[in-house]
Image (cartoon, rainbow, N blue to C red):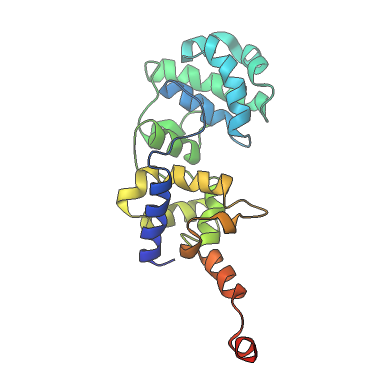
Amino acid sequence: MNSQMIQHFFETLQRANPAPQTELEYASVFELLAAVLLSAQATDVGVNKATRRLFVVANTPAKMLALGEQGLSEYIRTIGLYRTKAKNLIATCQILLSQHGGRVPRTREALEALPGVGRKTANVVLNVAFGEATMAVDTHIFRVANRTGLAPGKTPLAVELGLLERIPPAFMVDAHHWLILHGRYVCQARKPLCGQCQVASDCDHGRQLAAAAKPHPTMAAAQ
């Protein structure tokens, strides 16, 4: 994808969804942090189902810490790796209370120092909660970046850096949402819905399919 295609790609996604939002349900920065931490190797639908019950009783670090690992586990046992996530979330609550006055920090360094919070989780919190132009590369965004030619890379970090470099600044804050939603519902892993894709003309894969569908010049002449 060249710069003109990238510009049109994001203009198209923006027209289709001017104000994209995360599909995780939350009502505070702490709830967002907890939901993102729980979402690793799990679906947003599954996380939302668990947190709808959890956040009613524990929507602050102090209340969640009061549950303890076992109590928290009872609310999130339907989520993959729930024991490890419960341990990390309780430890995170302890740090938030002891080092940050119960508030979620706004720096990458402080966020990544929290148990269970890696670069991707920190990027989501910085982007969604604080409006920073970060790019959290999950499996959907990794696939879209490579398949479309937007920012090919062999590792999530390589793709992240490529996206930060190639996406026009005007689209950067919302780009994470557009790309993840596009990967989740259109540019799917096993069978991308290229026939329904609004940005197929800008995409390397879409253009390859279109070229393959055209009749060969000699065949067209023979007809």
Q: Quadrant of the N terminus?
A: bottom left
Furthest-left residue in view?
A: 170
Q: Which quadrant of the figure has residue 75? A: top right
User: Is residue 153 something one can see in this rendering?
Assistant: no
Residue shown at 48% from the left, 28% from the top? 114
Q: Which quadrant of the figure has residue 216? A: bottom right
Residue shown at 37% from the left, 53% from the top? 11
Residue in front for this viewpoint, 137 or 187: 187
Residue shown at 53% from the left, 15% from the top? 55
Task: List x then y, in percent, for residue 150.
Answer: 46, 60
Task: List x then y, in percent, for residue 199.
Answer: 47, 58
Residue in front for this viewpoint, 69 or 215: 215
Q: Which quadrant of the figure has residue 205? A: bottom right
Number of marks in picture: 0
Residue 71 appears left or right of 134: right
Furthest-front residue in view?
A: 223
Residue in front for this viewpoint, 209 or 178: 209
Q: Is residue 149 above or below residue 56?
A: below
Q: Quadrant of the C terminus?
A: bottom right
User: Is residue 32 something one can see in this rendering?
Assistant: yes
Residue shown at 62% from the left, 55% from the top? 192
Q: Is residue 57 above or below residue 155?
A: above
Residue 124 appears left or right of 133: right
Task: List x then y, in percent, for residue 212.
Answer: 61, 74
Task: List x then y, in percent, for residue 72.
Answer: 61, 15
